[in-house]
């Protein structure tokens, strides 16, 4: 029987040097070789702003790509992915199922729970003043325009093709 030292001489240990989610200051954001649009080096912000809404819409449509047999499940998954950017939309399964035969569903976007484009409450105005005075910049949700997401459903085979647009 060979000893551990004999076996170790024949083994070469190659540690994985590829992209990981745990890279310390390295390639975070380049997971599995996917360039996540400059989020890795800080060139882009991970939250929605008026500049990257088109990128976010492209990502949303990528999540919805293909034929979806469960429309509510697909929209739930897409909303979970969209939440990474701080954006979200209301999702009521009953309303979704009723909207599918008509071909469209429209929902107002919100940013961390604040509906985009709606008038501010006194509490929001107070918080805006605090944030602006402390940081010198406006809160992101105040810079985003009123936006709704429109989902179009096209029946094919045994499911639906879902396309999203921002309006």
Image (cartoon, helix red, strand yellow):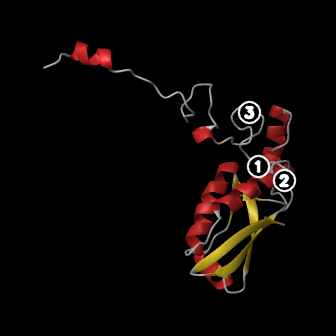
Q: CA distance from mark 1 to mark 2?
A: 8 Å
In the rendered image, residue 166, in percent from the top left (x then y), is placed at 81, 64
Residue in view at x 62 percent, y 30 percent: 27
Q: CA distance from mark 1 to mark 3?
A: 14 Å
The one nearer the camera, 128 or 159, is: 159
Per the image, label 1 sits on a secondary structure element best described as loop
Image mark for residue 144? 2
Name the mark nearer the viewer: 3 or 2.
Answer: 3
The one nearer the camera, 52 or 19, is: 19
Rendering quarter of residue 131 = top right
Mark 1 or mark 2, earlier in chain: 1
Q: Report the quarter where the C terminus lies.
A: bottom right
In the rendered image, residue 98, in percent from the top left (x then y), is placed at 64, 85
Q: Is residue 41 above or below residue 84?
A: above
Q: Please rate how many residues cluster around mark 3, counting C-alpha atoms within 10 Å: few if below 14, some from 14 to 19, many from 20.
A: few
Residue in view at x 78 percent, y 45 percent: 127
Instruction: Work out whether residue 6 can be spotted.
Output: yes
Residue that mark 1 sits on: 48
Residue that mark 3 sits on: 42
The reply to whether the C-beta atoms of the residues labelled 1 and 3 are less than 8 Å apart is no
Q: Report the quarter where the N terminus lies.
A: top left
């Amino acid at each position: 029987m060979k000893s551990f030292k004999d076996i170790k001489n024949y083994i070469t240990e190659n540690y994985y040097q590829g992209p990981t989610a745990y890279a310390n200051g390295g390639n975070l954001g380049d997971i599995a070789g996917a360039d996540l649009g400059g989020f890795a080096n800080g060139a882009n912000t991970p939250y929605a702003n008026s500049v990257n809404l088109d990128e976010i819409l492209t990502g949303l449509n990528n999540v919805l790509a293909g034929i979806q047999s469960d429309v509510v499940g697909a929209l739930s998954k897409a909303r979970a992915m969209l939440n990474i950017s701080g954006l979200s939309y209301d999702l009521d399964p009953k309303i979704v199922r009723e909207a599918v035969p008509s071909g469209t569903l429209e929902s107002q976007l919100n940013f961390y729970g604040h509906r985009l484009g709606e008038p501010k409450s006194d509490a929001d105005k107070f918080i805006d003043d605090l944030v602006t005075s402390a940081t010198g910049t406006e809160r992101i949700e105040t810079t985003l325009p009123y936006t709704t997401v429109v989902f179009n459903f096209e029946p094919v085979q045994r499911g639906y093709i879902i396309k999203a647009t921002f309006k």
